[in-house]
Amino acid sequence: MPGRHFLFVPGPTNVPDRIQRAMMVAMADHRSSRFPELSKPIFAALKELFQCREGEAFIFCATGTGAWEAALTNTLSPGDRVLAPRIGQFSHLWIDMMERLGLNVQVLDCEWGTGAPEARIEEALRADKERLIKGVMIVHNETTTGVTSDLRAVRLAMDAANHPALLYVDAVSSLASIDLRFSEWRVDVCVAGSQKGLMMPAGLGLLCVSPAALAASRNAGLKRVFFDFGDMLRTNPGGYFPYTPSIPLLHGLREALSMLKEEGLAAVFHRHARLAAGVREAVEAWGLELCAKAPRWYSNTVSTVMVPPGKDGARVVDIAFRKYDLALGAGLSRLAGKAFRIGHLGDLNELMLAGALAGTEMALADSGIEITEGSGVGAAQTYWRTGITAAERRGERLVANA
Ligand code: PLP
């Protein structure tokens, strides 16, 4: 199709021209004395992105799934107990990995559309009198349901229980888009990938690890080879890797980190919040519902939109793709056919998103879902112009009428 493809899945996201150009490099010797000039500043900037004051950042040639595995195998031993809320498909897959690695997972099953249940976490930790639970495993942003958990509240719950478990966070679809304060919230192991908020292709699994988790890694009994932190710790401080790194991806990462720094992290988070709020205005104007059950769970990187009973979300996604060259995210797992997802993260602005909302409206109408064409785009426009939501306007009117 002529014109630009509209990529609005919640990862991979659009790769800005600047990053694409930065990745077009000749291969170089990754053992040369010049290589650390590229690599060392990347580690420092990555720690800043995680808002990490103390700890280490690691870069693996992997995806988020590899980073999950690195997080677990470096810090835990076979049979260790961990506490993991299951709030959607990605938390489910992470739990599945924990079980396959031989960990003893205490699962907290939650209604999809809600986030990590702080009170239940506190209760479970208080009940663990022998302090057997070694880790609390939280998916910060559940990409299936469009739900963001409150990490600060989880940390407070852990503190309230006075429990020494480490806090593990999957930030695959939140890093560089939603505020995540590694040091302030005392996260111990945080994992991410390159293909979402960092605006790059998939291929880098990123981690930030606290001193406590690094200490745990010295006695952790799970087997790891490629993902061993120890090998990284022996080479990274000099600016090297224990194996051949992906040089184009490192150049891309350097550029991505520069772009995020130029915009400023606070501005990046604010932009994502503003764009997401516009999408939610559109969903409301269409008369549809989000999977996220309450505003406290709304994600600023992905909105999972439920289709009315009897309608097919997969059809909306397919029509959008085939007819309008718009890639929306499909409903996953138990949401298959029941929902579709709009990714709104990465290199994005209002007009790009307005185009995606227009395409979504056309695909919804083509799928026989009754919406008023233009209603969603109009609602988002009004919000982006004024910063006032429809609900706030209704409130104002009530006050005015009173
Ligand atoms: N965790 C979350 C929250 C995700 O959204 C994803 C992928 O979308 C993953 C983990 C897995 O990451 P990857 O596909 O990079 O292996």
Image (cartoon, rainbow, N blue to C red):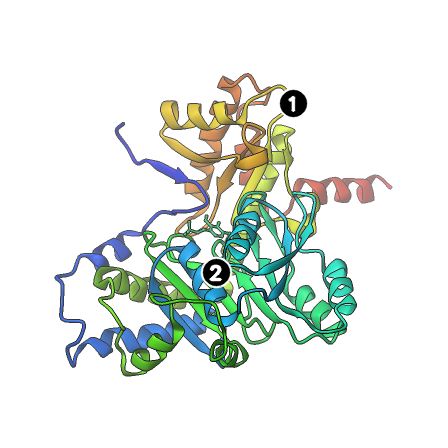
Residue at left offset 37%, top offset 24%: 322
Image location of residue 38, percent across then percent down: 24, 73
- Disc 2 marks which amino acid? Leu
- x%, y% of residue 1? 27, 27
**Residue 85 appears in the rendering:** yes
Mark 2 to mark 1: distance in Å?
Answer: 34 Å
Q: Is residue 164 above or below residue 271?
A: below
Disc on res. 100: none
Which residue does the image show at 27% across and 56% down from the upper left?
18
Query: Cβ of disc 1 within 8 Å of ligand 1?
Result: no
Ligand 1 lies under 8 Å from the Cβ of mark 2: no
Residue 175 screen position, x and y as percent: 48, 60
Q: Nearer the viewer, residue 6 or 310?
A: 310
- Pointer 1 residue: 309
Neighbor class of circle 2 (other Cα within 10 Å; few <14, some 14-19, many 20+) is many
Q: Who's the residue at 51% across and 81% down the image? A: 215
User: Looking at the image, which residue sits at the far right?
Assistant: 402
Tell me residue 73's x, y (percent). Answer: 46, 66
Disc 1, SS? loop
Name the residue that disc number 2 marks.
Answer: 175
Q: Taking the image as drawn, is residue 385 in sight?
A: no
Q: Nearer the viewer, residue 193 or 82?
A: 82
Q: Looking at numbered disc 1 in the image, what kind of residue is underneath it?
A: Pro
Indicate the quadrant where residue 232 lies: bottom left
Identify the image quadrant of residue 309: top right
Q: Quadrant of the C terminus?
A: top right
Specify few, some or many for label 1: CA neighbours under 10 Å numbering under 14, 14-19, or 20 or more.
Answer: few
Identity of the residue drawn at 55% across and 76% down: 183
Q: Of the residues under marks 2 and 1, which one precedes in the sequence?
A: 2
